[in-house]
Image: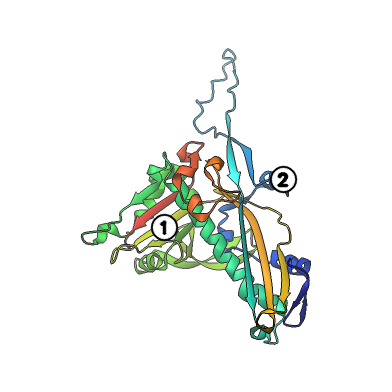
Amino acid sequence: MPRTGTINGFNFDPEVFGSYIQTKSLLNNRILASGILQYDPLIERMLGTANNVGTVPMFNSVDGESDALNDDGETDNTPTALAGNKQTFMAMARMKAWSEKTFTRYLTGVSPLTNLANNLVIPYWTNQREKDLLAVLKGVMGVSGMSTHINDMSVTSGSITDANKISLTTHLDLGQKALGDRRGEFALFICHSAVATNYRKLELLENKKFYSDILGAEISVPMIGNMIVFETDTGTVDASVANFPVYSSFMLGRGCVLTAEKKVHRPYGTDYDDETDGGVEKLYTKQAYVYHPNGFSIKADNIAKESPTRTELQTSTNWELKVSDKLIPIAMIKSNG
């Protein structure tokens, strides 16, 4: 079993290491600064230490309500019943362990705790969480009712023309089609570096200073209009057809993804194998968390085991839209450049 031990001769305390990790961001600062993630204390309370699936209430918007009545002293002001709904979420549980015969690469004069976190654990888990988030987005974008939130201009045969590439107005047109006069809610643009490069060539992507209430600081970030741009080449391109790469770019609004952490037993620990190769150090890590698209339910009965795989997350038939699509600030562009 993983236990308190040493790494390269230094004492390793899982609780201290866990506390240190909690002070670091496990998602890119651009994602955090955009505000697309909304911490949900109700989800966190429902998860506790024993649950991985739960249902939380949600309330319908009053945007579609009838006009206010004329207050003329004769008309009754009859209340309209507020409508509600519910959505089901599921936690993702992940684990990863590493081993080395010797840990000489950590003998750099840097604190082993800091070096482990910054150069091994944090980058790894940051990448894993981003992959899970993208899998969720791909899954919900294929749900019935979300067609007006997709602009698929890609081809996989014939020839690629300008019509298959993002243009000056692609994001504006899709924003209007998806949300109408609420298109200004989009706050983050996730795309492949090739797409970001094209936006720079179009002189639409520029570095701006942005103050983040979440980070509590002003940062310089690339932006397209009001959207912070986050470039990632992982999970944003399908290169299965030679010479016809299809890039998926996502437009996300503030608070569109509910999130919470789930407590796991012994999230960090070490072990030492005296026998193998004269001695092997081992580091164990575990995490569980929720990235739930607000307005959808995951069909938990479709999930084979107690934690959804990435393939299950990006399978559209495992999701259900629970509100009007006009309340969902998520959109996707599929292009060849």
Q: Is residue 122 left or right of residue 332?
A: right
The way the protein has been coloured in the rendering is: rainbow
Q: Is residue 12 above or below residue 335?
A: below
Q: Nearer the viewer, residue 299 or 98?
A: 98
Q: Is residue 279 above or below residue 323?
A: below
**Picture quarter with the N terminus:** bottom right
- Say if residue 252 shows up in the picture: no
The disc labelled 2 sits on which kind of residue?
Answer: Arg
Q: Is residue 187 left or right of residue 98?
A: left
Q: Is residue 120 above or below residue 169?
A: below
Q: Residues within 10 Å of mark 2 (few under 14, many from 20)?
A: few
Seen at 49% across and 31% down, the residue is 64
Helix, strand or loop at label 2? It is helix
Q: Is residue 179 above or below residue 116?
A: above
Circle nearer the viewer, 1 or 2: 2
**The quarter of the displayed image where residue 23 is located:** bottom right
The residue lying furthest to the left in this view is 158
Name the residue beneath numbered marker 1: 249
Q: Residues within 10 Å of mark 1 (few under 14, many from 20)?
A: many
**Where residue 171 appears, x then y in whole percent?**
39, 54
**Picture quarter with the C terminus:** bottom left
Name the residue beneath numbered marker 2: 45
**Where residue 279 appears, x then y in whole percent?**
70, 81
- Say if residue 141 shows up in the picture: yes
Distance CA(mark 1)–CA(mark 2): 33 Å
The residue lying furthest to the front in this view is 275
**Where residue 321 appears, x then y in whole percent?**
49, 39
Q: Is residue 237 left or right of residue 217?
A: left
Helix, strand or loop at label 1? It is strand
**Where residue 114 appears, x then y in whole percent?**
69, 76
Q: Nearer the viewer, residue 49 or 277?
A: 277
